[in-house]
């Protein structure tokens, strides 16, 4: 088929329009997407595996220490009142009458007669008994602190010792507060803090009693004396107006 020169020019010009980017418009002015679209490979290879975090086994709770690990040597404290046995005939009748109102009259006499000077009356007797309770409780605090600092003590033993150190310390503070209350003639505060002393000492006992396999590492005589002196103080305070 023969084409005229005009027809050939028209075909050539049409081809240029179809193939020229300028003829189709400038693609650089199109807005960019806010994220990148990853290229998809035409290869048949499997996609890379997504790493999965390794499962970390959950550790079992630490077993409780055995009673053998929790054992600790009972620490001796010299009871300053156990060997003090005054001659009954030498006991001041006033002191005896005051001590008779307590649950432990013998301990009351033993802890007061050798250490009290001057005229006996309920106030003087109570002050002496408070000093006696303060004396033995402070010794117990010192011994318990030494045990707590012992590196061989188990965690359970350390926890119980910590309770005792804290509460015996409270008892010391309460006994000192009782002396101040007497000086201020504040009988309400006096009876309140003396009651707290009994509770403080008992809290230490409870810490060990409620922990299986542990025993309070103080001599029973000393612990018993602490309780009795605290109760004596409370009993004698009932004689004060």
Image (cartoon, helix red, strand yellow):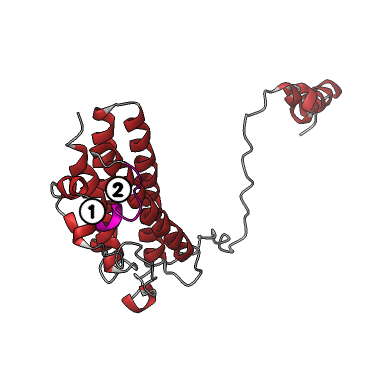
Q: Is residue 228 above or below residue 26?
A: below
Q: Position of residue 10 (x, y in %)?
A: 79, 22
Q: Position of residue 54 (x, y in %)?
A: 49, 64
Q: Quadrant of residue 209?
A: bottom left
Q: Nearer the viewer, residue 97 or 170?
A: 97
Q: Residue at x 36, y 75 (%)?
A: 71
Please identify the quadrant where the N terminus is shown: top right
Number of disc labels: 2
Q: CA distance from mark 1 to mark 2?
A: 7 Å
Nearer the N terminus, badge 1 or badge 2? 1
Question: Of helix, strand and loop, which one carries label 2?
Answer: helix
Is residue 202 a member of the stretch shown in magenta?
no
Q: Residue drawn 39% across and 53% down? A: 135
Residue 76, quarter of picture: bottom left
Residue 139 in which image quadrant: bottom left
Among all residues in the image, which is located at the extreme bottom? 68
Against 12, is 117 above or below?
Answer: below
For the residue pair 149 and 107, the one nearer the viewer reads as 107
**Residue that appears at 67% across and 27% down:** 32
* Closer-to-camera residue (132/156): 132
Residue 114 sits inside the magenta stretch: yes
Q: Which residue is mark 1?
A: 108
Q: Is residue 77 left or right of residue 215?
A: right
Relative side of 182 to 11, left or right: left
Relative height, residue 84 to residue 184 (above, below): below
- Where in the figure is residue 18, as x and y percent of width and height? 74, 28
Q: Are marks 1 and 2 in contact (CB under 8 Å)?
A: yes
Q: Residues within 10 Å of mark 2 (few under 14, many from 20)?
A: many
Which stretch did the figure color magenta?
108-118
* Residue position marked by numbered label 2 in the rendering: 129
- Which quarter shows the C terminus? top left
């Amino acid at each position: 088929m023969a084409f005229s020169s005009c027809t050939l020019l028209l075909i050539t010009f049409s081809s240029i329009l179809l193939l020229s980017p300028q003829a189709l418009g400038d693609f650089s002015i199109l807005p960019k997407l806010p994220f990148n679209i990853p290229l998809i490979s035409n290869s048949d290879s499997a996609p890379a595996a997504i790493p999965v975090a390794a499962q970390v086994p959950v550790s079992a709770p630490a077993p409780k220490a055995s009673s053998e690990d929790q054992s600790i040597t009972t620490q001796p404290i010299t009871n300053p009142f156990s060997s003090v046995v005054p001659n009954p005939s030498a006991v001041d009748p006033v002191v005896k009458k005051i001590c008779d109102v307590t649950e432990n009259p013998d301990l009351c006499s033993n802890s007061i007669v050798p250490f009290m000077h001057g005229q006996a009356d309920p106030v003087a007797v109570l002050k002496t008994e408070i000093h006696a309770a303060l004396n033995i409780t402070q010794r117990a605090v010192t011994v318990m602190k030494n045990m707590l600092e012992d590196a061989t003590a188990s965690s359970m033993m350390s926890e119980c010792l910590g309770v005792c150190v804290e509460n015996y310390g409270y008892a010391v503070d309460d006994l000192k507060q009782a002396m101040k209350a007497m000086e201020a003639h504040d009988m309400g505060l006096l009876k309140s803090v003396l009651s707290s002393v009994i509770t403080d000492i008992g809290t230490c006992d409870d810490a060990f009693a409620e922990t299986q396999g542990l025993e309070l590492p103080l001599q029973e005589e000393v612990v018993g004396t602490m309780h009795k002196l605290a109760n004596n103080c409370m009993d004698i305070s009932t004689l004060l107006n």
